[in-house]
Image: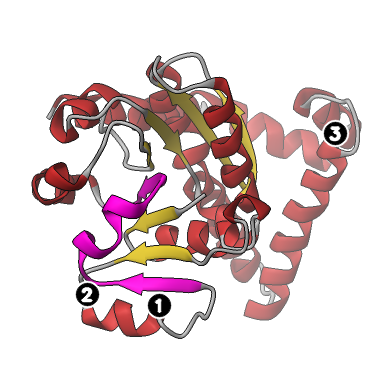
Amino acid sequence: MKVLVIGGGNMGMTYAEGMSSSPLLNRKKLMIYDNSPEKIQLLKNNKSFHVFDQLGQCLPNADVVFLVVKPFHCEDLFEIMKPMCNKEQVFVSLMAGVTIAQIQESLSINKVIRAMPNLPAQVGKGVTSFTESETVSRLELLMIRNLLDTTGVSIHVKSEKFIDASTGISGSGPAYIFYFMQSMTEAALKMGFSQIDSKTLVSHTFEGAITLFNENDFSPEDWMQKVASKGGTTQAALDSLEDNNVKELIKEAAFAAFDRAVELGKE
């Protein structure tokens, strides 16, 4: 299988590095394209890649094409790509808000998989939701899933609605976690802890809580009840969060990202 990644930015590099060692490539070098001279030079430092700055030299030869560019770049890019594409190729889009139908129409192709990655893919802890057009075979879908799994785990969803919804939960979700971590870090600093100790307190608290959650069958609510005791310190903190309606605000934030993803698909 010949795999091409279009876009050598952070996410493109992440998926390219993950997929480059996949046995599905059958020891063939993964192809990667970018039009930035600076990125081209950086990409050439990785001996696992076959780097291109001309689409005509790589796109016609690819079996699977990953589209990892900013959505506002896609219109101009598609005009260049269209004459070089064929209907046997499978296109995997990691572009937020760009629908399967838009890609099919713009490139005059049939086989499209739309995926929503997230930032932890950079450390092999990503989660990627994906869905496909009707023309993608079960074997092709399985192969793409195996490629996506090189950066963490993947979740197959029934329709594009859930791709947009994933944007609000997993795609944008790491930023919500960092927001919470920043707030806790600032509180620790205000209490008098050093920057290093504040980071250690917050990061290990999050890491430990996630490990507990993943290694047991208890719900988040169950864990809160285990930590909090009536009239205790934890309950005081949870009461403050409830009084300030933080839970509903987090839900509203997730839906704001979801709604924006839907809007992007209509622009």
Residue depicted at 52% across the width and 37% down the height: 170
Label 2 crowd (10 A; few <14 / some 14-19 / many >=20): few
Image: magenta residue range? 49-69
Question: Whole-percent x and y of residue 240?
Answer: 62, 34
Between discs 2 and 3, the one toward the N terminus: 2
Residue 42 location (% of width, % of height)? 38, 82
Percent x, y of residue 205:
77, 55
Depth check, mark 2 against mark 3: the one in front is 2
User: Residue 25, located in which quarter of the rendered image?
Assistant: bottom right
Eye-nearest disc, 1 or 3: 1
**Disc 2/disc 3 C-alpha distance (Å):** 53 Å
Amino acid of disc 2: Ser
* Placement of the C terminus among the 4 image quadrants: top left
Q: Residue at x 36, y 73 (%)?
A: 51
Is residue 22 positioned above or below 159 on the image? below
- The alpha-carbon separation of the residues under discs 1 and 2 comes to 10 Å
Report the residue marked by disc 3. Answer: 228
Q: CA distance from mark 1 to mark 3?
A: 50 Å
Could you tell whether 71 is left or right of 133 in the image?
left
Return the disc, 1 or 2, that comes first in the chain's sequence: 2
| Residue beneath disc 2 | 36
